[in-house]
Image (cartoon, helix red, strand yellow):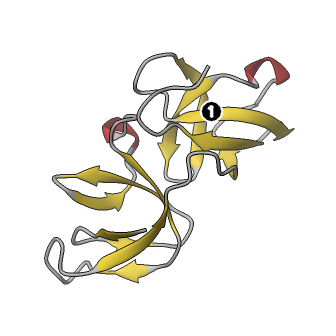
Amino acid sequence: MELEQGNVAIIKGAAVYYSSGYVINTTASSITCQTIAGVAAESQDNSGGSDGSVEIQVNVNPNALYEIDSNSTVAQTQVNTNCTLETNATVDEADPQDDYTGVCHISKMISTSKVLGRLNHFSPRA
């Protein structure tokens, strides 16, 4: 899906969210399930442009699974829980969530530092 991009640089594979109607790079303190847009399907630098002057292709499939790094050791007991995103490519599994800030659902533990997760669009998954 083509979405209007804010005046930032976005790299392919980065989680992006809506801010003032435009998609921008993820910052952990600003993301909720209502604002997460998806994952950038391409890289694009609009840091010198104005908000909405370009569109970026974003994967918005709520069932897509992504390999995501963890900011600390992952335990098997954290599989099937919701957590926050620390950065656009790192989960914070030590911050479990059950409200609208639980942006990532941990579906599988790949290693103690990597998970297979999906983004929670609009409502957390149980």
Q: Residue 94: image x %, image y %?
A: 61, 23
Of the 4 image quadrants, the one containing the C terminus is: top right
Q: How many marks?
A: 1
The residue lying at 56 percent from left, 53 percent from top is 61
* 53, above or below 107, in the image: below
The residue lying at 72 percent from left, 24 percent from top is 80
User: Is residue 111 among what the camera can see?
Assistant: no
* 77, above or below 12, in the image: above
On the picture, is 21 further left or further right than 90?
left
The residue lying at 46 percent from left, 40 percent from top is 121
On the picture, is 27 further left or further right than 59?
left
User: Is residue 48 among what the camera can see?
Assistant: yes
Of the 4 image quadrants, the one containing the N terminus is: bottom left
Quadrant housing residue 54: bottom left
Instruction: Provide the residue designation for mark 1.
Output: 105
On the picture, is 115 further left or further right than 8?
right
Quadrant housing residue 53: bottom left
Q: Residue 65: image x %, image y %?
A: 69, 49
* 103, above or below 114, in the image: above
The residue lying at 33 percent from left, 43 percent from top is 35
**Mark 1 packing: few (<14 Cα in 10 Å), some, or many (20+)?**
many
User: Looking at numbered disc 1 in the image, what kind of residue is underneath it?
Assistant: His
Q: Residue 25: image x %, image y %?
A: 37, 59
SS at mark 1 in the image? strand
